[in-house]
Image (cartoon, rainbow, N blue to C red):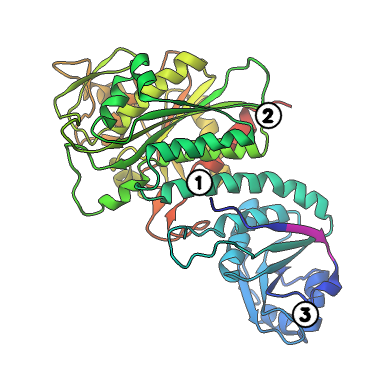
Amino acid sequence: MVKPVSVTFKETVLDDLAAAKGRVAILVDPDGRIDPAGRRVNRLTKGAIQRIIDSGAGKLKSGDLRTLAYPAGMAADAVDVVVLARGASHAEARKAGAALAKARGTALLLLAAGAHRRADEIVLGLALRDYGFDAHKSDASQEDTRGVTVMATRPDQVEAAAAPHLAVAEGVFFTRDLVNEPANVLTTTEFAARLKDMTALGLKVEVLEEKKLAELGMGALLAVGQGSDSPSKVVVMQWNGGAKGAAPLALVGKGVVFDTGGISLKPAGGMEDMTMDMGGAGVVAGVMRAIALRKAKANVVGLVGLVENMPSGNATRPGDVVKSMKGDTIEVINTDAEGRLVLCDVMHYAQDRFKPAGMIDLATLTGAIIIGLGHDKAGVFSNDDPFCKALLKAAESEGEGAWRMPLGQAYADQLKSQIADLKNTGGRPAGSITAAEFLHRFVAEGTPWAHIDIAGVASLKTDSAFAPKGATGWGVMTLNRLIADNYEGE
């Protein structure tokens, strides 16, 4: 997998600045004040840094970056002047780090962070933006020799503060890798194998095969994958870092490794993007990796349903009736409304086995959520106000857009079936809401639950603030923050 850039932390030694290779970055206040490292670089460049500052007088904004190329008096190829207030927010510091990542390209980087209190957040922004998925390019480098050195007044403190950030960045990268992988590589079997490998991090990982799923009665999930040669699976990942016996938070992810729509075949245009229809499972996997790497003091279980939705002589047909693990019968109106069939069985299993303190499911579930919210925010649906507020607060804290959407009986009524307990789709009106209401039916009384529709934010056609175009890893940071703030003991 793609790993975050290697970061070394060392005490500030001003004499090292002149001989540093690659790029050197210094921090400047919006009002033009520079720290000792900046003053040293200014002297080495015969006042060039001050001229850059003076030329931007009144225009410098926290998070901006100005570059001095081929600075005289230094071995570096460039000096990056990063504008960042001493009292900058963590969002501004991450933005500055992302700007550094874009500017440096493939060069070595020495960041003179001095005593800036947000140095660890700069590192996080840099790490998040410094990502590229080129595993299938013939000229891809097998080894990344680039590195970042952070010089700081108290390097041990900065390193300790940055360590959990880098763990989260690795979780984000794991999610991005999974979402970016083509479906002929990331089969259900390969996906399960990559998750199984995380036992090395201290996770307990089980893979439930089709025979076991049939014994459990997961007829809805199995119906989705029965048209494919790839076997359907459920992977259960447990992290027991909290109090013994304490109920875990359950995270459930939709893992449709490729979605043709089944017999209700999708149009050809854009179908190649359906490699990302396992985005929810990717987020759950990334969160589990992050909390294991940072050894979170919480109990969390991640469950993902891995299937492939293909048309064949064995595929589920529109009009078929399938039976869920809960016992409800479902009339399949549209085989392209398959994600909810996967999730409902995994959600029921999660509650039946683990009796969770709360449950969150994530899925690239509906195109309707993109019509409603675009690509800036995920849609959040919940049966519990405090639980939902905590989730939305975590998303806001991490700068990941999320917006609460409604639930209600009128929407649930759209799912009524004449021949079964419910239909798998309620038609075009309020499509994302009726999908959420379908899942709501499978939430046990008293279980705080949230459904997050990430169809619009899991993968983008353009660069975002902290990722190049493609998979974003949206949700790993939000759920990690939710766990840290609400489920970790002392």
Tell me the magenta residue range: 8-12
Q: Is residue 192 left or right of residue 242?
A: left
Residue at image position (24%, 38%) is 310
Q: Is residue 250 above or below residue 41?
A: above
Q: Secondary structure at mark 1?
A: loop
Instruction: Give 38 or 313, whichever is nearer the viewer.
Output: 313
Residues packed near mark 1 inside 10 Å, few (<14), some (14 to 19) or many (20 plus): some
Q: Mark 2 = which residue? A: 297
Q: Mark 1 = which residue? A: 400
Quarter in which the C terminus is drawn: top right
Residue at image position (26%, 26%) is 223
Q: Main secondary structure of the magenta part?
A: strand
Q: Is residue 226 magenta?
A: no
Mark 3–mark 2 Cα distance, whole angstroms, equals: 46 Å
For the residues carrying marks 3 and 2, which lies nearer the camera in this image? 2
Q: Amino acid at mark 3?
A: Asn
Q: Mark 3 = which residue? A: 42
Residue at image position (52%, 31%) is 389
Position of residue 186 measured from the top left corner of the image (x, y, whole percent) = 40, 44
